[in-house]
Amino acid sequence: MEWMTIGAFAKACRLSPKALRLYDELELLRPARVDPDTGYRYYAVEQLERARLVAWLRRLGMPLALIREVCGLPAGLAAREIRAYWARIEAETVVRRDLAAFLVDHLSGESRRETTKMLELRYAARSDRGLVRPSNQDTAYAGRRLLAVADGWGAAGALASAAAVEALKSLEDEELSAGNVLNLLEDAVRSADEAVREAAEGGAEVGTTLTALLWTGSRLALVHIGDSRAYLLRDGELFRITHDHSVVQSLIDEGRLTPEEAESHPQRMLLAKALSGDRAATPDLKLHEARDGDRYLVCSDGLSREVSDERIRELLDVVEPGDAVRVLVEEANSAGGADNVSAVVADVVLPTDPPVPVG
């Protein structure tokens, strides 16, 4: 066997001798031979491929614990793990990018007051029991500043969803600045989680999703936990702006399940995160720059499970928000109505007319 000194091996695989010593201690990359007298490490040429993989994964920023797992997998499974890891990084980067863009604008002193005064929301909300469930445990709300949908479950699911939305309604009357709105939303979600805990009678299992948009005048601040969804229709294209916190979505992210397989997966209804009164779940929080002509949809999974994204895009292409929520709910019921269905639609408009709530 051809031996390489630690210095030569480090040069060939682009890892420092210090890193190689650390990886030896962590049992991530052990030397092929250690001199019993000097303790000097030697590596085999055959170890270069693994060492280079470790170096590449470190350059991606992958944690060492995950690198150890990836290096122990067959090539195909390792590729899937790397793809899933990078998908998570990209999702996190989008959130940080939005926040960075806001901070640049905020700290540069560029005033957005004129834009803030010129844009308003026109909105509508609708919630329906569906055709199968005995009661409606969804709550849908649309107001001057707040758009929200919560989907409750358990014996007190209706109370939980209503309590979660009610905890956010106080923000309608707050003096909102884009710089503080995410903090206000985070505090409101804590209050919502407390309200859900109080809604659970006798320790019964209860919880709710919560997806809401809070209007600051030029931006919409998003808070999201669970598998209700928010969409943006802009220039004829539909974009989903939330990421489902569900078991099957986690499997999709990890490359262990395809979106097509997820539709019939036995755990498709299980949530990975929600408001359940345990203070453990952390919501997604981010800012969206609004444009005149944007249309936003917030909905429960009673709509998104029954109606495809492409069909949602087609149905959103009507003039009034009130008509949009009506046809969306009707479409979900026509597809079977297996769950409660709720939809909130809001348009970002120039204030030629006052905002008109519908539904």
Image (cartoon, rainbow, N blue to C red):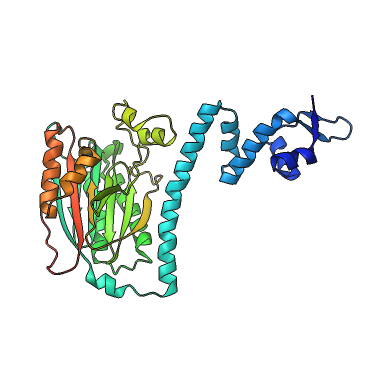
Query: Residue 214 placed where, x, y %?
Result: 28, 59
Residue 60 appears left or right of 211 = right
| Drawn side of residue 280 relative to residue 35, left or right | left
110, 354: nearer the viewer:
110
Which residue is at a point 80% across and 30% down the rendered structure image? 3
Q: Quadrant of residue 171?
A: bottom left
Residue 267 percent across, percent down from the top left: 33, 28
At x 44%, y 71%, the residue is 107
Looking at the image, which residue is at 14% across and 69% down?
352
Q: What residue is shown at x 29% (from left), y 30% (from top)?
A: 263
In this rendering, the answer to whether 110 lies above or below 338 is below
How many circles with numbers are drawn on the protein? 0
Q: Is residue 16 visible?
A: yes
298 up-or-down from 245: above or below? below
Q: Position of residue 119 (x, y in %)?
A: 23, 67
The answer to whether residue 204 is left or right of residue 342 is right
Give 42 or 187, whichever is nearer the viewer. 42
**Most distant residue in the right direction:** 37
In this orientation, does residue 129 appear? no
| Quadrant in the picture for the N terminus | top right
Percent coordinates x, y for residue 258 in the rendering: 37, 30
Instruction: Write down the quadrant of residue 268 in the picture.
Output: top left
